[in-house]
Image (cartoon, rainbow, N blue to C red):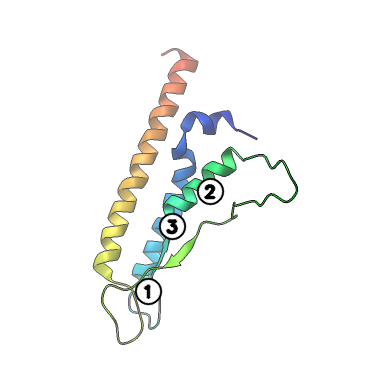
Amino acid sequence: MSNPISNYLGVHAAALPLREQRMQLIASNLSNADTPNFKAKDLDFQAALEQAAARAAPLQATHEQHLTLLDASPRVFERAGVQPSLDGNTVDADTERAAYGRAALEYRASLSFIESKVRTMLTAITGQ
């Protein structure tokens, strides 16, 4: 079922929780930078966003043998290390900080877009 508010907010309504999840993964990577054998993780954001968009507007199966391609959870994968570590840890602090900065910027951009849309809706409702 389609939600009119989600439709109005567009892709950013689905992107915001995914961006938050990605920031949590990156923060976890940074906090485990010194943990032996810890593998850096990341979120396949593009695939997760496509899944969220497909859930918002699901395809209709016309035959019982049609396969559903939607996975319930976003794809989290282990990111390859930039520089090998003797203890097996694949976290590169500089790469993670840069990824976190970019993810925070993207999160704020989506949030600003949603705020703008909500402001526009409130103006339409109140007339001010």
Residue occupying the far top of the picture: 127
Q: Label 1 amino acid?
A: Asn
Label 3, label 2: how many angstroms apart (C-alpha)? 11 Å
> Circle 3: is it few (<14), some (14-19), or many (20+) Cα within 10 Å?
some
Residue 93 picture location, percent across and down: 27, 69
Residue 25, image quadrant = bottom left
**Helix, strand or loop for disc 1:** loop
Residue 2 picture location, percent across and down: 61, 33
Residue 86: image tag: none
Q: Residue at x 30, y 58 (%)?
A: 99
Q: Earlier in the sequence, mark 2 or mark 1?
A: 1
**Dot in front, 1 or 3:** 3
> Circle 2: is it few (<14), some (14-19), or many (20+) Cα within 10 Å?
many
Q: Earlier in the sequence, mark 3 or mark 2?
A: 3
Which residue is identified by label 3? 44
Q: Label 2 amino acid?
A: Gln
Residue 125 picture location, percent across and down: 50, 17
The N terminus - image quarter: top right
Which residue is identified by label 1? 32
Residue 90 picture location, percent across and down: 34, 76
Q: Residue at x 41, y 25 (%)?
A: 119
Residue 62 in the figure: left or right of residue 110: right
Residue 115 in the figure: left or right of residue 65: left
Which residue is identified by label 2? 51
